[in-house]
Structure formats: C-alpha cells, structure tokens
Image (cartoon, grey):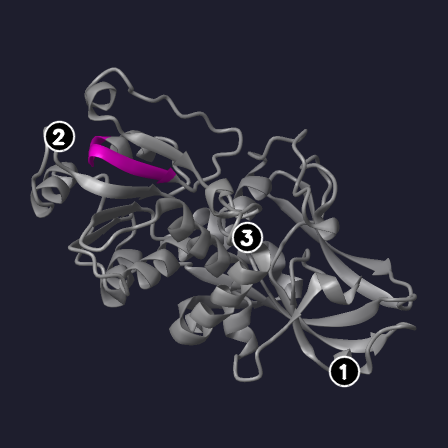
Amino acid sequence: MQRRALHFTAPRQVAWRRETIAAPSFGQVLVKTAISAISPGTELLIYRGQAPEDMARDDTIAALAGDFSFPLKYGYAVVGQVISLGPGVDPDWQGRLVFAFHPHESHFLATPDELQMLPLDLAPEDAVFFPNMETAVTFLLDGQPLMGEQVAIFGQGIVGLLLTALLSRWPLSSLVTLDLYPKRRLLSEDLGAHLSLDPDAPEAQERLLSHLQGAGPYPGADLTYEISGNPEALNQAIAVTGFSGRVVIGSWYGCKRSDLNLGGRFHRSRVRLIGSQVSSIPPELSGRWNKSRRYHITWQMLEEIKPARFITHRFPVAQAAQAYELIDQNPGEAIQVILEY
C-alpha cells in the first residue's frame, strides 16, 4: 500500500511524498494516523537548518534513527488507530487508538511496545500533547520545586505553558513567567502565573526582582527555568536567580551559541545550572523512577489539564508547508499547530 510522509528537504523546505509501505510482519501492527503535533522547538530548528547535522536525532526511539542532515523525516507526536495486525499480536490491539513517538506519516508500522494505548476517556487532541507534557513533568523532576519557593519561567511556548499549569498546582509563594508575545503572557496568567512579563521590556528584570521576596546576600528566584529556546535568555535567567538558586536549562539551542556572563553576580551567588532532557530520567531519581512511572503521571496530568485548548491552528497535511511557515514567521500567533490526516 501507499502512504504519505513529510520530508524536510532543505532549510525552510518541506515536501509531502508518497512511499510504499509493507503489510505488518510478525509482531507488528499498522497504524493509520489521525493527527500529529508539530514541535515548535526542535522541529523549528530543523526547518530553519539550525540543528547540528552530525548529531543523532534520538538514540532511544527507533523511528527517529539517523542524524539531522537533509533530507530527513521528523516529528514525535502522533495519534492514530491500529487498522491491521501482523501474526503474533494480541487481538486487543485491533481498532485501538494509540500514541506514538513517530514522524509525520499517514500510516506506519510499529511493534506494540512502541505504542501507548490512549486512556478511554482522553480525546486524541489531548493525547497528542503527550511528549510536551512528559517534558514538563521532567522539568519538575529536575528542578524539584519546594513548598513556598519563588519560581520564574523564561518561555511560554507550549512546553512553558504546560509547566506553568503544573506549577500552579504547587504551594509556591510566587510564580512569574516571561515571554515575548502578549497572547502567551495572557494565557500564562490564566493558567495561574502571578505575573507574566515581556523579557525585552526595559523594566522587566527590575519588576521581576521587586515581585520576589528579598532573602540572602543575592535575592531572587529560588528556581528558574530557561525554556524559551533563546540562548540570550540564559543570562537573564541567571541574573534573576537568588543565592544558591537553581537554573534548569530545558531549551535546546541547536547550532546557536550562548555567550554567558559568569564573571559578575553568578561567581558569588553559588547558582547551579542544571541541564534537563526528556530522553532520560534524572540519575539521582533512577532508583525510584523509570519511564513507565513518568508515562503514568504524564497521562494523569493530560487528563487533568486537557491541553487541547492550546491548539490554535489545524492544517490538513497537504498544507504542511503553510503550517511551518506560520510557526516560523508568526510565532506570537501560533501556540500549538497540528496536522490532520
């Protein structure tokens, strides 16, 4: 049979191509995609040609084998229905709605252990946020927010908004977010942020620090997240973090460089910089946490938060080029873009 697959062919160029796909073999199922979500972080780096070409896409996901050199297929948020079973597969999989970390394709083969069945009461439009919610959960595991702490988040893209929604459930003394775009800042405050600021405004740092309670020799946030994707924001994040505070760096900058100022306040304030990445469990938690446990809490949070409300644009897959152009040229208008099959 034939399927259609999205290919990144060159910077700012995508193509929707037909391919031949075999019938499922032993232990495989065939999935027909219903919707897939575009990652406005990693996928935008690929679309712009800013991902390091010699770097592996993801060593932990078979469907994402290979590097970032053009041409390539990418994507990691697909919801579809199992329409055919190969020999040796449990009949319970037939007809089930499933989630997969998989590129944008109309049909694909997978083994059951590469799929997750959707909870029966969760809509596909909520389930397609699974990777972003799992990332937000990982940020919590890495940052380990405490009761009464003051938290700042740089970046209110979709992962930042999900993180805000999660942290609003914590008994924090203050939750301040920063983002360039008014629509995101308004939504951030609706989700529970006490204050949301434009990081480029001249008074942004002063307003943020004045909102936080002073303590210690260098007052500021106890915990700061830098998830804007902008390397320049890391200096801002460090500057607003208090004595012995933590900065969790969840952004992937690709080929973009970060010129850090570590010669001033950072040198004396004992700030800790923590790299966070969802492909692994924080080593200090690996004795009690594994991916299955993280998956479980991710599904639970999807059911509670219902993130389908963050979908701002839907495109038929034939218009994928327009979808990527929108994210690239008008990021302030697009929060979550999905492709419909």
Please, what is the three-letter code of the amino acid marked with disc 2?
Tyr
The image quadrant where one finds the C terminus is bottom right
Query: Dot 1: within a 10 Å radius of its alpha carbon, few (fewer than 14), some, or many (20 or more) residues?
Result: few
Q: Tell me whether circle 2 and circle 3 mark residues in contact (CB < 8 Å).
A: no
Q: Tell me whether circle 2 and circle 1 mark residues in contact (CB < 8 Å).
A: no
> Residue at 27% of width from left, 60% of height from top?
188
Estimate the spatial distance between the alpha carbons at disc 2 and disc 1, rounded to whole Å: 58 Å
Task: Residue 308: name its quadrant.
Answer: bottom left
Return the residue at label 1: 92
Query: Dot 3: within a 10 Å radius of its alpha carbon, few (fewer than 14), some, or many (20 or more) residues?
Result: many
The image quadrant where one finds the N terminus is bottom right
> Residue at 65% of width from left, 43% of height from top?
58
Return the residue at label 3: 324
2 vs 3, front mark: 2
> Residue at 27% of width from left, 43% of height from top?
223
Q: Is residue 118 left or right of residue 219?
A: right
Q: Nearer the viewer, residue 264 or 310?
A: 264
Query: In the rendered structure, which disc, 1 or 3, sits on the residue that comes first in sequence?
Result: 1
